[in-house]
């Protein structure tokens, strides 16, 4: 799980606290974490692309309503985090990928 958390933190830390506005920082971190976890679920075949699309739509809607983030800002942050995860995942050793996927398989798909 250390590797998976490292990927999440690396993706979310780049700009999560760059803003002086704490609400913007929180929103940034939440969007980046959602994108990273979604991409990991897809890479690990823990969820299908359709399931990810549905989850992303719900996450986006919630972020817009609860975190007061603009839809275009959400899309930009999500795309940046998604791309960052994909680059890190592509260069991660197969053993680390497998370890992360094994840990993800033990997590519920839709936690309540």
Image (spheres, grey):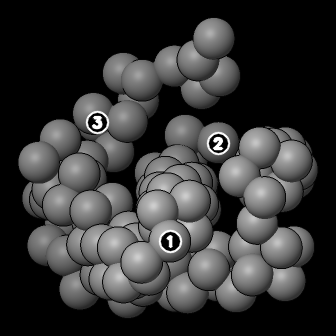
- How far apart are labels 3 and 1 at the CA level? 37 Å
- How far apart are labels 3 and 2 at the CA level? 13 Å
Q: What residue is rendered at 75% in x and 81% in y?
A: 73
Task: Identify the image quadrant of the C terminus.
Answer: top right
> Does residue 78 lie above or below 29 as drawn?
below
Q: Circle 1 sits in a helix, a strand or a loop, which is it?
A: loop
Q: What residue is rendered at 70% in x and 86% in y?
A: 76
Please state which of residues 45 and 22 is positioned toward the viewer in this rendering: 22
Mark 1 crowd level (few <14, some 14–19, many ≥20, 10 Å Cα): few
Mark 3 crowd level (few <14, some 14–19, many ≥20, 10 Å Cα): some
Residue 13 x %, y %: 30, 72
Q: Is residue 56 visible?
A: no
Which of discs 3 and 1 lies nearer the camera? The answer is 1
Mark 2 crowd level (few <14, some 14–19, many ≥20, 10 Å Cα): some
Q: Are marks 3 and 1 in contact (CB under 8 Å)?
A: no
Q: Locate residue 78 relative to residue 8 in the image: left or right.
A: right
Residue position marked by numbered label 1 in the rendering: 21
* Sequence-earlier tag: 3 or 1: 1
Q: What residue is rendered at 18% in x and 61% in y?
A: 6
Q: What residue is rendered at 36% in x and 21% in y?
A: 106
Residue position marked by numbered label 2 in the rendering: 47
> Does residue 19 lie above or below 1 as drawn?
below
Which of discs 1 and 2 lies nearer the camera? The answer is 1
Disc on res. 93? none
Q: Circle 2 sits in a helix, a strand or a loop, which is it?
A: loop
Residue 22 x %, y %: 46, 62
Q: Is residue 74 visible?
A: yes
Please state which of residues 69 and 112 is positioned toward the viewer in this rendering: 69
Q: Are marks 1 and 2 in contact (CB under 8 Å)?
A: no
Residue 45 x %, y %: 55, 48
Residue position marked by numbered label 3 in the rendering: 102
């Amino acid at each position: 799980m250390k590797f998976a958390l490292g990927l999440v933190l690396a993706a979310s830390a780049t700009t999560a606290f760059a803003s002086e506005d704490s609400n913007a920082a929180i929103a940034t971190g939440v969007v980046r974490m959602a994108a990273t976890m979604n991409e990991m679920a897809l890479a690990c075949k823990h969820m299908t692309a359709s399931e990810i699309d549905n989850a992303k739509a719900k996450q986006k809607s919630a972020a817009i309503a609860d975190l007061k983030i603009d839809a275009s800002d959400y899309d930009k942050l999500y795309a940046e985090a998604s791309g960052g995860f994909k680059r890190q995942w592509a260069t991660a050793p197969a053993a680390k990928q497998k370890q992360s996927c094994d840990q993800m398989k033990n997590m519920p798909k839709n936690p309540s």
